[in-house]
Amino acid sequence: MKLHELSDNPGATKKRKRVGRGPGSGTGKMGGRGIKGQKSRSGVAINGYEGGQMPLYQRLPKRGFNKPNRKSYAVVNLGLIQKFVDAKKLDATKPIDGAALVASGLVRRELDGIRVLAKGDITSKLDLHVTGASKSAVEAVEKAGGSVTVTVKAEAAAE
């Protein structure tokens, strides 16, 4: 088989509809947009508009509640911390806090605090100072000989 012998399966490709290319094309002059009005102009997309009928998003019941002041934590897994310690990006001998995690590049920013989860294995003896940690993460760190100190972030303490 040669390159010029390659072709798509029949029906796999469709010719582009060229709108506004004369009366013989079937979509000339107004280009299938009708006469005048907002929808005949360019740059108009009326999302969710159903011609005056009550739109679907308004017909459906609203449920739930979005807490306006809810906290969002930067999540770190133990496996990643171990990987960064092995790569010498984190110093296991010093206490590891939010600033150290940000400096190493493991966390982009602290947000409302850092929460440690137990995904992955930990072998280094670590001293973690974080805003939150799951029970299994605390157990895993203590099993490896380290300790986890859960501290409250300064801004949260002021409230």
Image: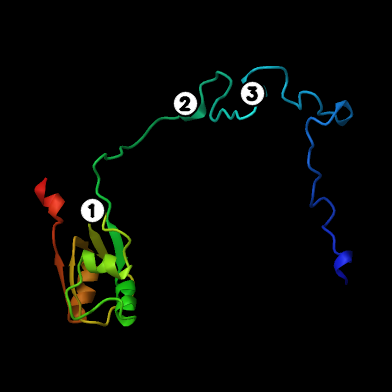
User: Label 1: which residue?
Assistant: 112
In the shown orientation, is residue 129 left or right of residue 67? left
Instruction: Please report whichever mark, 1 or 2, sits nearer to the chain's N-terminal start.
Output: 2
Instruction: Please report whichever mark, 2 or 3, sits nearer to the chain's N-terminal start.
Output: 3
User: Label 3: which residue?
Assistant: 39
Is residue 118 something that shows in the picture? Answer: no
Write down the quadrant of residue 44 in the picture.
top right
What mark, if any, has residue 59 been given in the picture? 2
Mark 2 or mark 3, whichever is nearer to me: 3
Q: Which kind of residue does numbered mark 1 sit on?
A: Asp
In the shown orientation, is residue 25 left or right of residue 78? right
Q: Is mark 3 on a helix, strand or loop?
A: helix
Mark 1 or mark 2, whichever is nearer to me: 1
**Residue at (82% x, 27% y) in the render:** 28
Write down the quadrant of residue 124 in the picture.
bottom left
Is residue 84 something that shows in the picture? Answer: yes
Q: Which kind of residue does numbered mark 2 sit on?
A: Arg
